[in-house]
Amino acid sequence: MEETINILRPKRKQSVNNEAEQQQTQPEHHKRRRRTLDSKTEKLTRQPDPSSSNRFQLLACTYRKKETESSREWVCNSSTSSAYGEKFVVVSYNILGVDNASNHSDMYSNVPPKYMKWKRRRRLIRKEVNSYNAGIVCFQEVDRFDDLAHKFRKDGFDGVHKARSGEASDGCAIFWKHDMFSLLHQESIEFQSFGLRHNVAQFCVLKLQDQLESDIPPDTSMRPCTQCRSLVVGNIHVLFNPSRGDIKLGQIRLFLEKAYKLSLEWGSIPVIIAGDLNSTPQSPIYQFLASSKLDIQKHDRRRISGQMEFESQYRTFMYNATRYGKPFVYRWSAEEVRLATGCEEVTHLQHHLKLGSAYRGVPGSKRTRDRWGEPLATSYHSNFLGTVDYIWRTEELVPVRVLETLPIDILKGTSGLPSKRWGSDHLALVCELAFRR
């Protein structure tokens, strides 16, 4: 037995020595791989230090959190809260008209039919809007207003509707929480009366209700509001046709003119502009709203909305084309100029509202924003993935926070919108605004 052991021991030692020799002769990349595996094994088996257990718990929570189709997060402005007056949440939402969905079913061929049912979509939209604690809601593509108003009335909303002219049945609707705002005035525009198709726009002048003394915390020096705030809310759904930039510009021109006029009539009050503009970020139409000026001769009428351009967060839209080092002037017919500017002799557009995009006013994630700060996508179906929806406000209003849209990879992971979670082919834009102190 002892002899056997003596015989076996040398062999075992030799085996170990051979293994060590093999390790010494292994290529360097094998050694690196082995060290990596050993390191990973150590990390997996190591017990957390009690003094740093919170760090490990936080890491575990972060790891377990999975980004899903429902992952929309609020991001806040860096300004101090002392700069804010009364605050309220605004929602702009193209809810996909029932008839539009039916007439363009090819755009939703990948969407399960049950997700297209109006009753289901209405329930999701209603639940979503209420989750935002919205004070003002601007809907586009509303063709079941009575049905929608009946449900939202139960949630404390009042609303007005403006149907499109012509054969189409959809239109725009503005709702407001009646315990937060009261309606002072309403107007609308039928663009057909200006030869600008059957789209419509609507306006409400809303007054913020007096703040109740019982709502004021006893440990603050705030006094009950002695001057109630009013504002103009404009809601629009611009013509879709990408090649008719002249008509799009004409609609937006009249829309901004009316908003400015109402603001002056009611004492130069703030203005909120919301809607589906059927124009992409940094397009000439977008620049017109942002800068208040536009020379239409520098732009191709068919590309003025940006819809026909390649959509990418890395692309810089170059519309001011040059030829041989000189600005290229595009030819517009006299009729096209008249539709766009209101006069055949005028080629320079200008509006008087100092507008800023709500989303651009609050820095966000690169996964959901383009290089200019606008959402990468507010609409997704088989024919389009991009941004056409906006909330704009004048400088008297400050964006406090906005709700991020969904990252492109999450959107592409669905079969398109509507989906199990969202009731439209557009995502709602949601912003909390505050009166500037």
Image: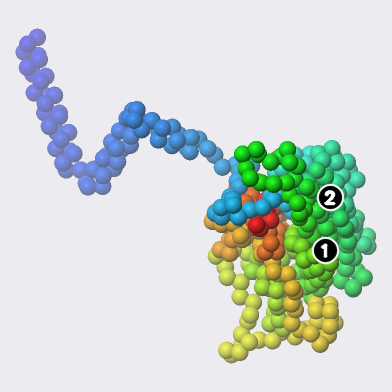
- Image spot of residue 155 (x, y percent): 81, 39
| Camera-nearest residue between 89 and 228 | 228
Depicted 25 relative to depicted 250: above or below:
above
Report the residue that reaches farthest toward the top: 1
Quadrant location of the N terminus? Answer: top left
Q: Amino acid at mark 2?
A: Ser
- Image spot of residue 399 (x, y percent): 64, 56
At a point 66% along the width and 46% down the height, the residue shown is 222
Q: CA distance from mark 1 to mark 2?
A: 14 Å
At a point 61% along the width and 39% down the height, the residue shown is 219
In the image, 269: left or right of 40?
right
Tag of residue 266: 1
Q: Amino acid at mark 1?
A: Trp
Depicted 329 relative to depicted 120: above or below:
below
Q: Residues within 10 Å of mark 1 (few under 14, many from 20)?
A: some
- Image spot of residue 61 (x, y percent): 48, 35
The number of numbered badges drawn on the structure is: 2
| Camera-nearest residue between 172 and 8 | 172
Residue 319 position by quadrant: bottom right
Looking at the image, can residue 299 be seen?
yes
Quadrant location of the C terminus? Answer: bottom right
Tag of residue 364: none
In the image, 377: left or right of 196?
left
At a point 57% along the width and 89% down the height, the residue shown is 325
Residue with the mark numbered 2: 182
